Amino acid sequence: MPTMEEYAKQPIADRVKRLERTPDELAAAIKGQSATVLAKRPDEKNWAAVEVVCHLRDTEEGFAGRFQMLLAMDDPQLFGPDPDRWAAERQYLRNDAGDAVAAFRKRRQDTLDILRKLTSEQWKRGGSHPVRGRITIEDFVTLMAWHDDNHLDQLKRAVEGKA
Amino acid sequence: MPFAYYERLSRAQQKIYRDSDGVTELRLERPADLHPRVTALQAALSTEARPATQAATEGLIDGLTDALGIPRVTVEVLAARPHAQWGELHGLYTVTRGRRPKIQLWMRTAKHKRVVAFRTFLRTLLHEVGHHIDYTLLRLPDSFHTEGFYKRESSLFYQLVPDARRRVSAPAVRSMEDWRAALVADRLERLERTPSDLARLVRGHTGTVLSRRPAPDAWSAKEVVCHLRDAEEHLSGWIRMILAMDDPVLVTTGTADRWVEERQYARHHVGAAWDAFGRRRDETLDLLRGLPAEAWARAGRHERRGRMTVDDLIALMAWHDDNHLDQVKRALDGKP
């Protein structure tokens, strides 16, 4: 699994390809699993598979929102999400994992549509992130590629009952 | 059922009260004749110019008194409402012996000096004309605020603004422009009350009823609660952006209907959703109450609504609460 630094060195097209693959990989990872398995947390703190899928769905919407901000404003302040609060508030454990993957697939498509239209200058547009400091659209795509890997791995472990 | 103050009136006054309460409607013979004057008043008020509003107000009141066959009154439209100890003065009807009775109306709010919403202004106008009607048409020796008085005022309002009838089914829903003209304290009070109003509405209903959509494309009560929860996060997020940046773009990442589907509201537990909404709402109120006055004028840019201040967003939220509380009521009644 490449680190963020390693992803950053890859051509943008390769990183985008990684993003394109994720919906199918998610669908494959949950295929044939019962709702009980998908909603079972490996331990008290770690998310169940369905929570991981919902997290990817909702952060995808968040990423698209940030891209809109970075494209419309000069150096905006970005706010960090609160993923654990979302998991509880939006009741991820009650979600259907298959439907959540379908929703993620659409959101990811929206993101890819934004990215495919960017000019080379726009890839460099940036803002201030509360944790990560100055961050550009290109940095976000690096982050997303790594984030996908990380959560796919987490999901596979959760299905096996591992934290 | 008379209002509580009835008991404190003398016997003679109680007789007047009962006479007033007995007349619940005033029929205009040809209300449509006055519609152009109503439209002219709305147009004049929207220019925010006092002389134009004065002229249009006079035109409508003269039209009304003539139509009812009662003497004309002197009309005075003034700028900002004066503060009174019990609140703001909206309108005033005075009779001085030997002079023509006078109606005074204020076209701007006391605090923010904003032009009053058209419907609010028209209601105030009809309220004051109502006092004049009591003395001159109904020949009452005094003019009390009885239920009959308010019904007469409403009957005139709906003859003058026929399309307002659509709102009668939901009298609790105030328009966004009404909320914008309302006092900040009233708006915050609306926001504070919503979680308990919501609880009262959903309490005692089964999960099946709460999850039932009144029509295929109309949300269930539960979906409305989930929507309020997520909208609270979204709208308070905009306020935080406006406070943190100068003139930020207020981005939207999806329609409310898309959220309903993709976040699978139909599978949520309504109690937990209500609880989460209440916590989000408390946080919003904490944020708003801690703001210095000048922060209310800070603004962001919305793709569709244009420039929106914190003040506008609070009006939007108050209207949004009204609107969705009403929707919950209807959904529980099986009405879209």
Image: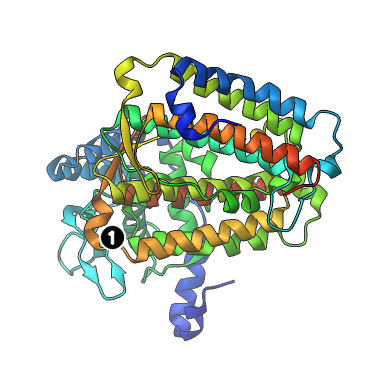
Q: Is residue A79 above or below residue A33?
A: below
How many marks are shown on the rendered structure? 1
Chain where mark 1 sits: B
Q: Is residue B148 visible?
A: no
B172 or B319, which lies in front? B319
Q: Amino acid at mark 1?
A: His
Measuring 59% from the left and 49% from the top, which residue is drawn there?
Answer: A86
For the N terminus of chain B, give its image quadrant.
bottom right
Image quarter of the C terminus of chain B: top right
Where residue B249 sits: x, y (%)?
Answer: 32, 35
Task: Please say which color scheme the image uses.
Answer: rainbow
The answer to whether B121 appears left or right of A9 in the picture is left
Place of residue B265 in the rendered image (x, y in percent of width and height, measured from the top left): 68, 42
Residue that mark 1 sits on: B90
> Where is B275 relative to A64, above or below?
below
Residue B172 seen anywhere in this rendered image of the structure: yes
Look at 48% across and 27% down and name the residue there.
A7
Q: Position of residue B221 (x, y in %)?
A: 69, 47
User: Is A73 displayed left or right of A147 in the figure?
Assistant: left
| Dot 1 crowding, Cα within 10 Å, few <14, some 14–19, many 20+ | many
User: Which x, y percent locates residue A66?
Assistant: 41, 34
Between residue A82 and residue B139, name the one nearer to us.
A82
| Tag 1 secondary structure | loop
Does A69 sit above or below residue B246?
above
Residue furthest left as drawn: B51
**Front residue (pair B100, A4):** A4
Displayed quadrant of residue B98: bottom left
In the image, taking residue B120 as reference, residue B19 lies left or right, namely: right
Q: Residue at x 87, y 37 (%)?
A: A34
Q: Which residue is nearer to you in this view: A1 or B226? A: A1
Q: Residue placed at 70% from the left, 28% from the top?
A: A26
